[in-house]
Every structure is written in C-alpha cells, then in structure tokens.
Image (cartoon, helix red, strand yellow):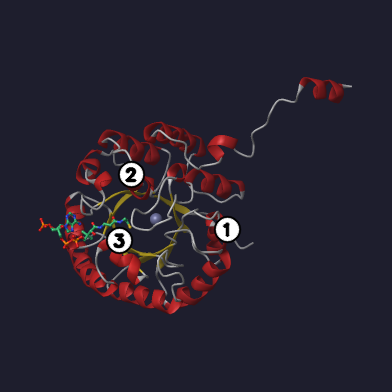
Amino acid sequence: MRLPGRVTICEVGTRDGFQIEPEFIPTERKIEVVDRLSEAGVARVEVTSFVHPKAVPQLRDAEAVMAAIRRRPGTRYAALVPNDKGAARAVDAGVDVIHTVVSASESHNLANVNMTIAESLDRLRAVAQIAARAGVPVQCGVSCSFGCPFEGDVPVARLESVVARLVDLGARGIGLADTTGMANPRQVSDVLERLMPRFPGIEWTLHTHDTRAMAIPNILAAMEHGVTNFDASIGGLGGCPFAPGASGNVCTEDLVHCLHAMGIETGIDLERLLGTSRRVQEIVGHVLPGQIVKAGPFTRKYPLPEAVAARVRR
Ligand code: COA
Ligand code: ZN
C-alpha cells in the first residue's frame, strides 16, 4: 500500500457531533471537551458553527465556547459558517480558520441552508471577502460530494463545478464530505483521481460518516491518492440534522488507533483520546459507536484461563 507517514486529523465532534444531540450540552462541557482534545495533541478542531440559532439550537453558544477554550499553541481552532453573517461572527470570535459549507446536491443545500447552490456560492464570495480582510484562511467543505439522501447519485461533473467555483473564490483547502455515508472506496478513488490533477495546490480533506461502515476503507482509498487530512469525531458522535439517515462521523480514536497500528503518525496521544471519549459518553449520556473504547487497542492482552495456563506450564 502507498501510505503517508503522517496524517492530520481535524476533530469535528463538538460541531458535527454535538449539533445533533437531543439534550443541550452545557457550554462548560463543550469547552472541556475542546480543551481535552487539544491536550491530547489534536492539531485541528472544528469547535462549533456560526449558524442560525433556530436552525441548530445546540450550537447557539458558539461565541461563549470560542471565548473560553484554552488555546493550545499548535492547535488550529476552526468553525463552520454558511454565510457572511456567520463569517463575521466567526472572525469576531477569533477563529483561526473558517470552514464553509455548500452542498453538491441542490436539494440538500436547500434543506440545509435554505439557499440554492448558486445563492450559497454568492454568499460564500462575501465570506471569502470577510475572511481575507481579517487574514483568516478559508477551507470549503462540499456536502453530499459522493451522493445525496434525497437525490441519490451526485454526478462528479456537478461536484467538480462546485469545487471550481470554490477555488475561484480563493479556497486553499477543499473538504469532500460524505454527509450520509454513501461513498465506497472505489468511488472515492475515482473522484480523487479526477479532481486532484485539475486543482493543483489545493489541500484536500475527506470528511466521512460511518453510516454504512465504509469510513475507514474510504480513508484508506484517499490515502492511496496522497490525501493526508481527515475529519473525525470523538466517539463517532455525529450526524446532520438536515440529512435524513445521517449518523456519526468516523470515530477519531478508532481512526487514530488504525493509523498508529500501521505506523502512521498523527501527533495524538491515543490513551488521552480514549479518556476523552469516555468522558464524552458521560456528557452525552449514551453509548457512542466507537469500538476501541470497548475492545481496547490491538496490543491488549488477556490473562490465560487457569486451566489452559496449567497445560501451557506442563
Ligand atoms: N448566524 C446567526 N443569524 C443568522 C445567520 C448566522 N450565520 N445567518 C442569518 N442569520 C439571521 C439573519 O440575520 C436574519 O435575522 P433577522 O430575521 O433578525 O433579520 C435571519 O437569520 C434570516 O436570514 P436569512 O439569510 O434569510 O437566513 P435563513 O432563514 O434563510 O437561514 C441559514 C439561512 C444559513 C442562516 C440557516 O439555514 C442556517 O443557519 N443553517 C445552518 C445549517 C447547519 O448548520 N447545518 C448543519 C451543518 S452542515
Ligand atoms: Zn458531517
């Protein structure tokens, strides 16, 4: 396999994850989780989103969270914004990076942000201007890059035209999001093979959901193309409130465990990450999909049953 030596993970659990939790997570708990993640060595955190509080009530405390997190040198703190109003709020709150969102599916974009793709792209031009004035880089995510829960297939030509518009707006990074876990590894490979040579110099990120257990295989396929940036959420939290059937992102600690097992560095302390995942389970009050928290890492050993041990000794 052609694998990179190092991968950068962007933790999105406090945004993509917490946005869909049924109970409001107190602001102090959100801050605690962000701080624990950065202490575990996570280099990028999508802390929250600056969206309409009625659209996503869970994240109505975005300003308060951004104001109180302990900024660890070496961690980049981002937030998701859908429009210029969100960008202005994010800049005022002191984000290091703005993550924007537009969908490659017309129906999903309307459901998510109440705009056509063309209207979204217009608003994202205004976002780019606000960001440029503030000296804040912009990374543009494209929802439903590999399929839409309303429309089904999303033609790769449509994805490509949305990416081209975002690159024209000045995006340095493009995130391809598999919002409802429809992508398969061959498709990820085909899409990257087509897009990457057409947009040289772009930093690509793959944003996966493990809805159909294809997230890590998809990440492997992307790594084979040289992609080294992946979004993940602690415990496997997550889902999009405006995309039916969406479930959690690829689980951060499961992905880190897999990468470390293959000798790929992440800069993240897996033990601390597992501790954070357990804490997040306490905070949300339900079991999360992450598997390593339950199974332990592959290095875990169990005591041999006494009867078997006696035979081994003989
Ligand atoms: N933050 C806070 N308020 C916002 C806002 C933002 N980013 N964007 C718009 N508003 C306010 C406007 O100021 C306006 O307020 P007013 O009625 O007091 O004048 C009101 O919302 C309506 O503005 P409009 O531009 O017509 O927004 P809308 O009602 O069409 O909603 C979005 C558009 C994008 C703001 C809304 O759909 C949204 O926040 N979606 C978030 C989706 C999301 O987070 N999805 C999950 C992640 S992918
Ligand atoms: Zn997502």
Q: Secondary structure at mark 2?
A: loop
Instruction: Say whether marks 1 and 2 touch (CB < 8 Å).
Output: no
Check disc 1 and report the residue beneath it: 217
Can you give x and y, in whole percent of width and height, for residue 108 in the image? Answer: 34, 65
Of pointers 1 and 2, the one earlier in the residue sequence: 2
Quadrant of the rendered image containing residue 105: bottom left
Q: Which mark is residue 73?
A: 2
Q: Is mark 3 within 8 Å of ligand 1?
A: yes
Q: Quadrant of ligand 1?
A: bottom left
Check disc 3 and report the residue beneath it: 112
Label 2 to label 3: alpha-carbon separation: 34 Å
Q: Secondary structure at mark 3?
A: helix
Amino acid type of the residue that numbered disc 2 sits on in the rendered structure: Pro
Label 1 to label 2: alpha-carbon separation: 32 Å
Q: 222 above or below 233?
A: below
* Residue placed furthest toward the right: 314
Nearer-the-camera pick, 206 or 223: 206
Left or right, residue 138 beside residue 220: left
Q: Residue at x 27, y 35 (%)?
A: 26
Can you give x and y, in whole percent of width and height, for residue 171 in the image? Answer: 31, 68
